[in-house]
Amino acid sequence: MNEPGDVVAAFIAAIEAKDLDTAIGLVTDDVSYENVPIAPIVGKGAMRATLEGFLAPAGRVEWPVARQVVSGNVVINERLDRFQIGTGWLELPIAGFFEVTDDGLIRVWRDYFDMSTYTRQFAALTGPT
Amino acid sequence: MNEPGDVVAAFIAAIEAKDLDTAIGLVTDDVSYENVPIAPIVGKGAMRATLEGFLAPAGRVEWPVARQVVSGNVVINERLDRFQIGTGWLELPIAGFFEVTDDGLIRVWRDYFDMSTYTRQFAALTGPT
């Protein structure tokens, strides 16, 4: 379970289950959560608040991983983060980089993605009909 | 030189030198060049035309690689693609995924980035003063 690839897989699974207690239990107190288009978010509390905001509008959450590569304490994945919102799905392609400590906690989570791909779909799924 | 990591490093170096003959010589005829926010570009000719468009407004081009990970025929890097435009620099954080054939040619190049981070800076550097 302390293998970096397994830690990240468990973290992703917890988010898909909207189980933030488990997810936050897998990160360091000073975790740096970096959505590259915006400023880094530092610390468990700030990460949890941000994730709650992302997950709140979603019914189901599916983050299928197309590719995962582990190199030492670094885990890299290509994902399609999917959020069921209203009657549709928001789909966001992501490149994620994770740094995992020797005791199996995520200390850096950095996601590269196109913000407008998110905001455009979010507006379409939540806007006036 | 046929090692995947070396092929990608040579490709990046050629782009920094604006040497498209060398860069295009390192990709397959049916290369898929995927800037994730937009549609994939397929084939050497289309890739070359696209790169010419990206590089034309730039004086110097620097793509420093902060991290490169190789797994089999896959090369992943985190880069800061920098373009000198006018009196300033456009800087774009990128996560790049490359698939390299056994004979040392890039057949897939997929970059994850935030399009508005590019367009916002480009407008500021080229707009009316």
Image (cartoon, coloured by chain):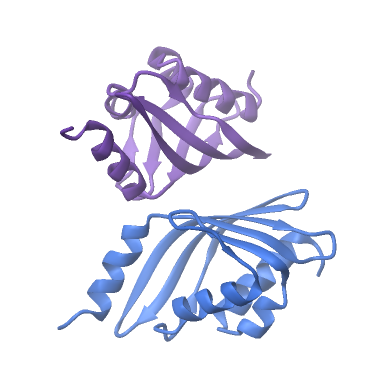
Chain colours: A blue, B purple
Q: Residue at x 44, y 31 (%)?
A: B82
Residue in the foreground of this view, choosing between B106 and B90 = B90
Residue in the foreground of this view, choosing between B4 and B128 = B128
**Is residue B48 something that shows in the picture?**
no
- Where does residue B76 sit, x and y in percent of width and height? 59, 41
Q: Which quadrant of the view contains residue B127?
A: top left
- Where does residue A20 sit, x and y in percent of width and height? 61, 82
Q: How many marks?
A: 0
- Where does residue A105 sit, x and y in percent of width and height? 76, 66
Q: Quadrant of the C terminus of chain A?
A: bottom left
Q: Give the vertical position of A40 relative to B48 (above or below).
A: below
Is residue A86 toward the left or the right of residue A94 in the image?
left
Q: Which quadrant of the view contains residue A124?
A: bottom left
Q: Which residue is drawn at 27% across and 65% down?
A: A120
Q: Give the vertical position of B89 relative to A116 (above or below).
A: above
**Is residue B1 something that shows in the picture?**
yes
Q: Give the vertical position of A7 relative to B73 (above or below).
A: below
Q: Which residue is drawn at 26% across and 38% down?
A: B124
Q: Residue at x 51, y 25 (%)?
A: B12
Q: Give the vertical position of A61 relative to B1 (above or below).
A: below
Q: Quadrant of the N terminus of chain A?
A: bottom right
- Where does residue A13 sit, x and y in percent of width and height? 62, 75
Residue in the foreground of this view, choosing between B116 and A16 = B116
